[in-house]
């Protein structure tokens, strides 16, 4: 009990004295005692910068040789010191670096140690990660780790304008990487198209599902609306980047006529299209009064759940006839693309894969990630800005993707689509794991 009281009194005394470091610790740390007073992170930064200076001096000695010794075979010599910068925790810190020059007058000899730590790529990566996580440029300095007052006073590249420039540069690179992806060796089982509206600016985005069940952002195209011209340009770009238009893949659309027209133009009349049943259900029910919606919804879902394509199509046809007299708008909405809401049933796809691909939920999940990452943007100054943010959000979503539910049946889907669009082509064999084997 007495020991506990003594410890408590000692802690209180230490707190009142400004949390002084023990004498033994102060002696061991020397100049770093002040940094240790500010916390472990500040101490680690101080030690790290000291180690960096030692590493650079050691590298100079390896390149030039020991100081004060004449070496007739040396290829470089010391040339004093100058100020430099290294990247640390999303900021740039000033350091003093040694210089080495060639004895033959061929210029400066780069030190690998300094080049590695001075690389700006870690800085731009940290900036992009924090911006996509929702940090604004004004609040960016608040998200940084504490590195000590002395170090922080000399840090730069944390102002609003500097962070903004770094983010623009990084997202421009991300956009270029996404739009330059080669698709020659990509084997798709399904391809989804949809549009995302960003305060008056529309981007049409594309998501592919490989025969392994991997979701892959394929590209995007900017336009004023979700029209056929924009969608056609996007699909044509995919073909130019190596996507084989002859491979059997299912196109999953939300029902927009412009997107359907673009698919027909680029991939032909025989392209297999699955209309999103959730969009179709919503469109039909919006034409009905509240009291009639539950019954119609049950009948729609019962027809879409049918394993027999003919029966399901008949049930939808009967429902359309019954709706014609009282609610012609609902009947017309149901008949538009009605057969394409049962494409998966016609191809013999059942179970969890049918539930996954019968709607555009996978691509809408990616679009939601784009909206979430761009939620702090108040003003879209240009179409290029919208493209950059959209591409960055798509790549952010890609890092969170999991294989689609029911992926083991994707090979079966690809074979079924190929057999339908090219009846004379022999079906491709499948492996034991159910993955399509391509030449």
Image: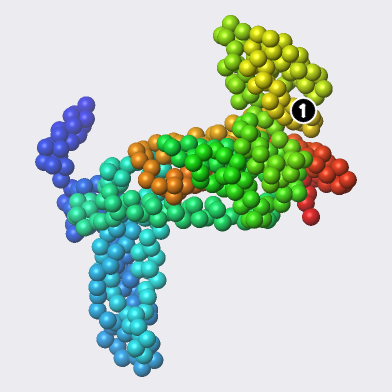
Residue 289 lies in what quarter of the image? Answer: top right
Residue that mark 1 sits on: 345
Q: Is residue 400 left or right of residue 251?
A: left
Q: Is residue 431 left or right of residue 65?
A: right
On-image quarter of the N terminus = top left
Residue neighbourhood size for the residue with mark 1, other residues' Cα within 10 Å, grouped as few (<14), some (14–19), many (≥20) = many
Q: Is residue 213 visible in this depiction of the protein?
A: no
In the image, residue 301 lies at what x, y percent? 69, 18
Residue 32 lies in what quarter of the image? Answer: bottom left
Residue at 18 percent of width and 32 percent of height: 8
Residue at 31 percent of width and 73 percent of height: 57
Q: Is residue 57 visible in this depiction of the protein?
A: yes
In the image, residue 421 lies at what x, y percent? 80, 42
In the image, residue 378 lies at what x, y percent? 34, 38
Residue nearest the observer in this picture, 109 or 60: 109
Residue nearest the observer in this picture, 105 or 371: 371
Residue nearest the observer in this picture, 293 or 304: 293
The answer to whether residue 361 is above or below residue 231 is above
The answer to whether residue 309 is above or below residue 216 is above
């Amino acid at each position: 009990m007495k020991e506990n009281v003594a410890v408590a009194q000692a802690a209180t005394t230490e707190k009142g004295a400004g949390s002084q470091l023990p004498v033994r610790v102060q002696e061991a740390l020397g100049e770093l005692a002040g940094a240790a007073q500010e916390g472990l992170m500040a101490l680690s930064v101080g030690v790290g910068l000291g180690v960096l200076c030692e590493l650079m001096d050691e590298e100079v000695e390896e390149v030039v040789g020991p100081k004060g010794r004449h070496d007739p075979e040396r290829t470089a010599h010391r040339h004093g010191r100058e100020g430099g910068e290294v990247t640390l925790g999303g900021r740039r810190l000033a350091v003093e670096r040694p210089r080495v020059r060639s004895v033959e007058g061929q210029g400066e000899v780069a030190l690998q140690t300094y080049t590695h730590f001075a690389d700006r790529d870690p800085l731009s990566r940290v900036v992009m990660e924090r911006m996509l996580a929702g940090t604004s440029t004004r609040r960016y300095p608040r998200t940084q780790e504490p590195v000590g007052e002395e170090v922080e006073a000399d840090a730069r590249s944390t102002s609003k304008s500097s962070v903004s420039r770094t983010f623009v540069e990084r997202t421009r690179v991300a956009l270029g990487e996404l739009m330059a992806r080669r698709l020659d060796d990509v084997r798709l089982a399904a391809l989804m198209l949809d549009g995302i509206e960003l305060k008056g600016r529309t981007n049409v985005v594309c998501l592919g599902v490989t025969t392994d069940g991997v979701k892959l952002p394929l590209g995007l195209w900017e336009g004023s609306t979700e029209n056929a011209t924009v969608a056609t340009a996007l699909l044509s770009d995919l073909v130019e980047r190596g996507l084989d238009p002859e491979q059997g893949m299912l196109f999953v659309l939300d029902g927009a006529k412009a997107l359907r027209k673009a698919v027909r133009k680029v991939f032909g009349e025989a392209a297999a299209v699955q209309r999103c049943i959730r969009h179709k259900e919503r469109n039909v029910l919006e034409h009905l009064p509240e009291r009639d919606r539950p019954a119609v919804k049950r009948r729609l879902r019962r027809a879409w759940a049918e394993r027999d394509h003919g029966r399901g199509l008949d049930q939808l046809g009967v429902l359309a006839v019954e709706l014609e007299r009282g609610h012609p708008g609902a009947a017309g909405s149901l008949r538009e693309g009605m057969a394409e809401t049962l494409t998966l049933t016609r191809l013999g796809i059942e179970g969890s894969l049918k539930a996954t691909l019968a709607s555009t939920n996978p691509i809408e999940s990616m679009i939601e990630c784009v909206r979430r990452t761009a939620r702090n943007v108040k003003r879209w100054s240009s179409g290029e800005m919208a493209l950059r943010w959209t591409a960055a959000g798509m790549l952010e979503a890609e890092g969170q993707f999991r294989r689609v539910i029911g992926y083991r049946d994707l090979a079966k889907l690809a074979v079924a689509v190929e057999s339908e669009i090219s009846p004379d082509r022999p079906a491709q064999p499948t492996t034991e794991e159910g993955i399509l084997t391509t030449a």
